[in-house]
Image (cartoon, rainbow, N blue to C red):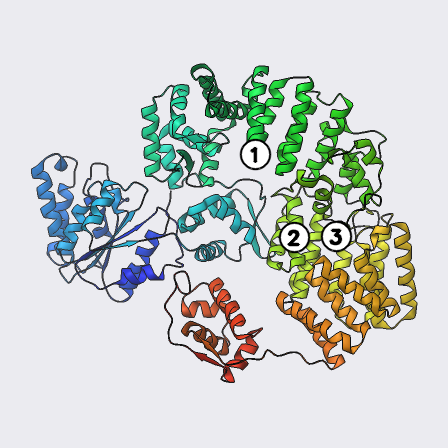
Amino acid sequence: MSRERIELCGRDEVLDALRGTPGASLTVLRGPTSSGRTALLTRIGDELRESGSTVLFVDAVQDHADWDRFGVRPLLAAVRRSFEQLDPGLELPGAMRSVRHLATAETYESIAGRSRLRAETGRLLAAVGARGPVTVAVDDADHVEAPLFVLAEARRAGHRVLAATRTAQLPTEQVAEVGDAADEIIDLLMLPDEASVEILRRAAGGPVDPGLVDALRGALGLLFGCPGTLISTLAALRADDRVVRVDRNLCLRDDRAPIGLPTGHFLVEAVRTAGRVGEELVALAAGPTGLRIADLDAVAGATGRTAVGCGAVVDALAAESALECDFRGRLTPLCRALGTTVRAGLGEDALRDLHVRIGRRLQSTVELSGRDDLSALADHVAAAGTAWPAQQRLTVVLHDEAVRVADSDPDRAITRLRSAWRHAGPGHGRRRVQTELIRTTRAAGRFDELADFVADAVDEGGYRTTGSRTELTAAAALAALQLGRRVSTPVRSALAGIGDPYCPLELCERWWRGDHLSLGELVRGFAPLAPGGPVSTLRDLSADSLRVPADVRHAYSRRRLVPLLRWLQGPGYRPPAAGPFAAFERMMIAYGDGRWNRALSAARLLQTQESADLVSRPWAALAAAAVHRYRGRERRALAWAQMIPELDDTDTAVPALREWAQARLAYTGENPLEALPLTWAVYRRELRRGSPGPHAGEVLNWLAMLARSSNDDGWRRRIGEAVEEAVAAEPESVGPEYGDLIRAMLHDDPAAARRGVAWWRERGSLPDLAQACLQAADVVGAEEAEPLLHEALAIADDLKAVRLRRSVRRAMARYGIAVRTPELTEQRLSELEMQLVELITEGRSNRQIAARITMSEKTVENHLTRLFGKTGCRNRRELVVAHLAGRLTGLAPEPWEPGVGAR
């Protein structure tokens, strides 16, 4: 793998140790491949040169030949490159000629030749230091067969030697030899998480979305702490066009596709060096069947190899850290990304063929009496897929093994059930397996598997009976909704119920287009998947008679389907973990909880999902615009609003989200009479969709608030009539949380205002609760307004919503309510905390503070959060005031805690 330029971060302690005291010594820097050893040696070399010292940098890989056991050729090449800087005397050119003449394969063949080479190499190193000792930095010293030859001679010549070597699970002879001779050993540990994130930010050239960070952390595992691996993996993602910049942040395009290591990564090269058997072993260890030490006999027999040979390859891969073995004898790749790359390199056809051969071997040579034997056979038959011809006698084994692991390992149960369904063939047994498979995939949230299974069932004509057709239709629609994509044409043609208004496929298509669906329609459409009770009876019930809970209705008003599906299907439903549907759910929950950075991350991801329905992406952009608007970032809010597609008058399916965002952004808190017509136009645009829809309550509440601020009775009457018409047309369009606030705004009803605030407290959406408190305070009177406004201000401070804070403070000033200032007693702070306070008093930003005291910007932010909590200050201004007032004093220096502060 080509060397990467790695920006140092989080390695200050290592650099301090490398600086050390000059003198004749051997310091060994040990660390995993891709951990930044080269960057550290380069950095210390640059520092020494700047201070006037002479540095000879030897790359043991460059110019090395296989016969060069001592690594003399790389040393000679380094001297040649640095000849001018070495200030050579009369001895150096002659010593170089002698070593160059002896540096041949023939010299190494005799003891006398090696002795002469050693003597001349010592003379060369002495000549290098003729004007004074130098620092000899040797990178990848363990690449040489006998590296101690040059290292010891350099130390003997009076030079300070810095040697970088690898660390591995099984240290090589070279590494052990150098370590034994070293005067000092520095072990280079994996980077702390925050330093890795900072390296990613630098490599990306700007902010990195938390979703991309999480995906890389999950795929790379321990290697997330290796700078070289991070940078090369990000470069590979860029080359494959898998990342895109959204809202200034670098984001992953699809969170469902696995991330692999780049093809030139040292672990991938180690597996490739092990040959085909190494690739197959790693692929098996990373695949659905897994790989145990006990399986090597079967693998060897199936592939025409010996168990001893396979074991030797496992040992070699373990020595390179490519494979790990746990106490149960189960082998796993060092990280998921390695398995992803190796399996992709082999290809699906080769993997299926491998599973067929191993499965046949198990069938023919192993007596299937033990549980492990049956489990292994079931796994390989399932993994072989269609490459294994259908055998009905395997159905029982596959089904029983699936049931056995259904609770502990649902993913494995799903693959076994799919295989059991295929091997069962047409008949009642297949229908029973089908029902279990659909139930298991829903409970595990594996809707990709469910969609693929429905497609297979349609291809094989497994939808002829009424019960099977009903079940498959609901399953196909549910899978399409969860995956954020439309039902395929073949499935739709085979399963669509002509003339059935509650056909799940039709409901799914309408949802994807952005049509408004009532709760009753969805309940009746997905009734076949609900547990208990006759399906026909449940389909005849309306949403009202089923008594859908209020929190489910509210979630649905914001286009969240998860609470409804969970209520309808019970524990037999689990939402997907990735994809546009999951991203939308995460975004809405995080927005309400006040975790706005996570909400923005999910909104960015949705903008990259081209398969998402026509409303999810615009709705996500609307939420992101609201976050930036609350935070006072008007330009970024406007940029998000402009991401929402502009609709023409003929497009009546999709809500007028762009117009709604623009109306909210345009209103500055003044001239409500100018804002009313624009917002009213948004509402009228909503009505063209045929019904007010779930979005109407929020728009009508905003209109009611504007009407109250304008003191225009005409607008009040018009909005009141609109509310009555909306409720009459669609009772679910204006939920009680909005209905009570609207009534309070239009009719000066304090009781309704209190109920509106209570509803939002129950809903748990912080920004909406703060807005409700602000609205209610304008109705209930000064005495009741004070606690409401203090509650709204506290929420605004927690959310860092500067625009909301300004609105609350204006209302407090209008009522003559004083802003509470925290009662600060004298606080005794640590030395680091006092340093932070001093820098804040000087007006330094977090980034400037991080550079000044040598820690990451994220660490500074964490320290400030703890500092605010300790002092009771809510912001920098209050902290500065407390400091200048003498209420903050320092303690004696505290013991330094690992992982805290500068690294």
Q: How far is mark 2 from mark 3, CA to CA?
A: 17 Å
Query: Which residue is rendered at x = 83% and y = 47% of the image?
Result: 652
> What is the quadrant of the C terminus in the image?
bottom left
Q: Which residue is mark 1?
A: 411
Instruction: Inspect the image, locate mark 2, and give the three-letter code of the amino acid beneath it.
Output: Met
Q: Which residue is mark 2?
A: 587
Q: Answer left or right for 863 relative to 531.
A: left
Please tell me whether mark 2 or mark 3 is closer to you in this view. Answer: 3
Q: Looking at the image, can residue 179 be seen?
A: yes
Q: Which residue is mark 3?
A: 551
Q: Answer left or right for 749 relative to 198.
A: right
Instruction: Inspect the image, locate mark 3, and give the three-letter code of the amino acid beneath it.
Output: Asp
Depth check: give the residue in front, 220 or 101: 220
Mark 2 lies on a secondary structure that is helix
Q: How far is mark 1 from mark 2, CA to CA?
A: 26 Å
Q: Where is residue 720 shown, x and y percent of the image?
A: 90, 62
Query: Which residue is rendered at x = 26% and y = 42% of the image?
Result: 143
Instruction: Inspect the image, locate mark 1, and give the three-letter code of the amino acid beneath it.
Output: Asp
Please tell me whether mark 3 or mark 1 is closer to you in this view. Answer: 3
Give the farthest residue toward the bottom: 885
Depth check: give the residue in front, 747 or 336: 747
Depth check: give the residue in front, 256 or 3: 256
